[in-house]
Amino acid sequence: MRFVLDACVLFPNVMRSALLAVAETGAYEPIWSPRLLEEWRRAGHRHGPDVGVAAEAEIALLALRFPKARRATPENLDRFYLPDENDIHVLALAVAESADGIITVNRKDFPRHILAEEGLSRADPDAFLVGAAQANPGPISLALRRVAEDGQAGQDPRGFFKKARLPRLAKWLVQQT
């Protein structure tokens, strides 16, 4: 499975870390473009210079961790439509790369019926992560627990992921213990 990661799931640190940890297990192949990474970088800088610098460092590390994930930003966007024209590049990337879908929290601007016309699905990150974990619980549970340990030493994984807008994932992890 191949999914384009929208900028809104790349910027929150925990959500991105969880999605990428699951990708490293081989559950799916992540895809992004320079434009998506630039949106993430700008979002980081809007939250302050330290956050912006951290975003730039994370973006550089992604090139090493996922060298095949970065794809060219599509140039011909004319045939595509989305409610927010600033998101059309995400749809065009998914189509150009024959992705299975787009992982995003932005339901309003990625209507399922429009994506379906292009053979794509829209995946909510929380539901996507739970589905991946249910399909391959051992390695994914381990990867997600490492994300929680790295992010908040000693904090309960349920509270950690719940705070990161991943409540179903948090509940699933607790049920696995």
Image (cartoon, rainbow, N blue to C red):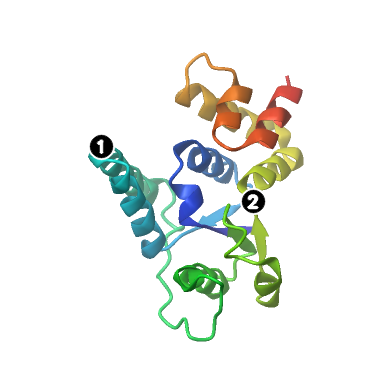
Distance from the alpha carbon under mark 1 to that under mark 2: 28 Å
Q: Is residue 176 visible?
A: no
Residue at 42% x, 63% y is 33
The circle on residue 124 is 2
**Which amino acid type is marked by label 1?**
Asp
State the image coordinates of residue 48 (x, y, percent, origin top left): 27, 40
**In the figure, residue 155 lies in which quadrant?**
top right
The mark tally for this picture is 2
As helix, strand or loop, the secondary structure at mark 1 comes to: helix
173 to 19, vertically: above or below? above
The circle on residue 1 is none
State the image coordinates of residue 99 (x, y, percent, origin top left): 60, 66
Residue at 49% x, 36% y is 14
Q: Quadrant of the N terminus?
A: bottom right
Identify the residue at the far bottom of this view. Answer: 79
Identify the residue at the far top of this view. Answer: 154
Q: Earlier in the sequence, mark 1 or mark 2?
A: 1
**Which amino acid type is marked by label 2?**
Asp
100 to 40, vertically: above or below? below
Which residue was labeled with disc 1? Answer: 50
Residue at 28% x, 44% y is 52
Work out whether residue 32 or residue 170 is closer to the camera in this orientation and state it.
170
Neighbours of disc 2 within 10 Å: few (<14), some (14-19), many (20+): some
**In the figure, residue 73 lies in which quadrant?**
bottom left
As helix, strand or loop, the secondary structure at mark 2 comes to: loop
Instruction: Report the side of 55 relative to 87 (left or right).
Output: left
**In the figure, residue 166 lies in which quadrant?**
top right
Q: Is residue 129 visible?
A: yes
State the image coordinates of residue 54 (x, y, percent, origin top left): 30, 39
State the image coordinates of residue 131 (x, y, percent, origin top left): 73, 44
Instruction: Report the side of 20 relative to 74 (left or right).
Output: right
